[in-house]
């Protein structure tokens, strides 16, 4: 699979996409959030080729979202377990699922429900502002250049066009 | 690019991933949320091949996230404008960005900031329960089979293993 250099872009979305890579990676994470830890169980429920699964698991280990824990020796066999960084990806999955349930489900309804144990109700994710708690929507946000944006790119016309408020 | 049949899986994450397809698609959406509408402007800021950009824009039009609006006739030229379905994808992008800012930014900090116009503060996305408003985290949710889950798959051992609470 062709890789580009999105990892070095000054954009957390591009960097995350570089890490995610293709559609199998979120589905491997989906299984991990469902409690799957064994290679053969990932393979059974996803039905993808073993070499593809090996590569996706390795990518997630390299990126720090999964870690290997030996459950057997001679020969050694591993569980794939979510790290803190991996568990912290759950809200992204929940936001994807909410969007898909809204726009891609057929008339029979969502295939999978999420129950929030905290309140006991079936729920969907809502994405809100960490400061005021109100929804973050495309028409209520302004993008600004941040401290990690490279100096040498700040003067580019296409950058200025995309961050008008940062010029003030 | 190889396509699989994820669109027909009983999973809103798989269906969304099938639609997103590869890392360029979220980046095309990122540009659209930044106000980019013209083919040449997408091409300039993303730097991807024109045929790849054409395919990604077409996929987003076919999926209903973007629509073409003519801005010129003879020859006809189009703006690519977010639909309601497309604008509704913003929270997913915000959740991805929050995760990337937390785990993939270097010591200089996030490259891009999001200001919430509603409250006026720089912010990050938090993903919460639509019912109680508390955070949705991997250790506070239970997955259950939903009304759209196919009957013929409900008895499978791997399905039962992944949805234990649905058996009660």
Image (tube, coloured by chain):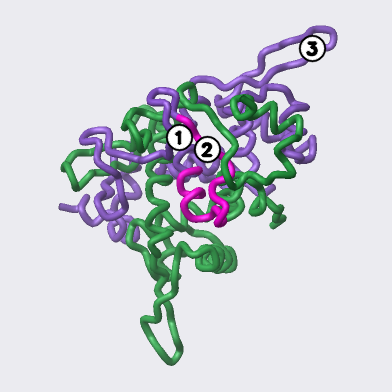
Chain colours: A purple, B green
Left or right for A74, reference B82:
right
Residue tagged 3: A76
Quarter occupied by residue A10: top left
**Mark 3 neighbour class, 10 Å CA radius: few under 14, some 14 to 19, many 20 or more:** few
Magenta span contains residue A109: yes
**Mark 1 neighbour class, 10 Å CA radius: few under 14, some 14 to 19, many 20 or more:** some
Q: Nearer the viewer, mark 2 or mark 3?
A: 2
* Disc 3 element: loop
Left or right for A168, reference A90:
left
- Residue occupying image coordinates x 42% and y 31%: A121
Left or right for A5, reference A149:
right
Front residue (pair A48, B51): A48
Residue tagged 2: A113
* Disc 2 element: strand
Residue tagged 1: A122
Point out the residue furthest to the top here: A73
Rounded to the nearest angstrom, the CA distance separating label 2 from label 1 is: 7 Å
- Vertical comparison of B86 with A101: above or below: below
Q: Position of residue A7 (x, y in %)?
A: 51, 40
Label 2 with label 3: CB-CB less than 8 Å: no
Q: Which mark is residue A135?
A: none
- Residue occupying image coordinates x 69% and y 47%: A1
Q: Are marks 2 and 3 on the same chain?
A: yes
Magenta span contains residue A106: yes
Which residues are drawn in magenta? A97-115
């Amino acid at each position: 699979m062709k890789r580009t250099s999105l990892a070095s872009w000054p954009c957390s979305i591009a960097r995350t996409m570089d890490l995610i890579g293709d559609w199998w990676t979120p589905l491997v994470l989906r299984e991990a959030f469902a409690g799957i830890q064994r290679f053969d169980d990932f393979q059974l429920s996803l039905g993808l080729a073993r070499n593809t699964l090996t590569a996706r698991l390795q990518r997630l280990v390299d990126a720090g979202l999964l870690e290997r824990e030996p459950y057997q020796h001679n020969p050694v066999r591993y569980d794939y377990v979510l790290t803190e960084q991996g568990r912290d990806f759950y809200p992204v999955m929940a936001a994807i699922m909410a969007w898909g349930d809204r726009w891609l489900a057929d008339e029979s309804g969502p295939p999978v429900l999420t129950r929030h144990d905290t309140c006991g109700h079936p729920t969907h994710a809502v994405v809100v502002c960490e400061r005021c708690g109100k929804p973050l929507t495309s028409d209520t946000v302004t993008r600004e250049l941040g401290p990690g944006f490279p100096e040498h790119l700040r003067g580019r016309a296409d950058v200025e066009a995309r961050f008008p408020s940062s010029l003030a």
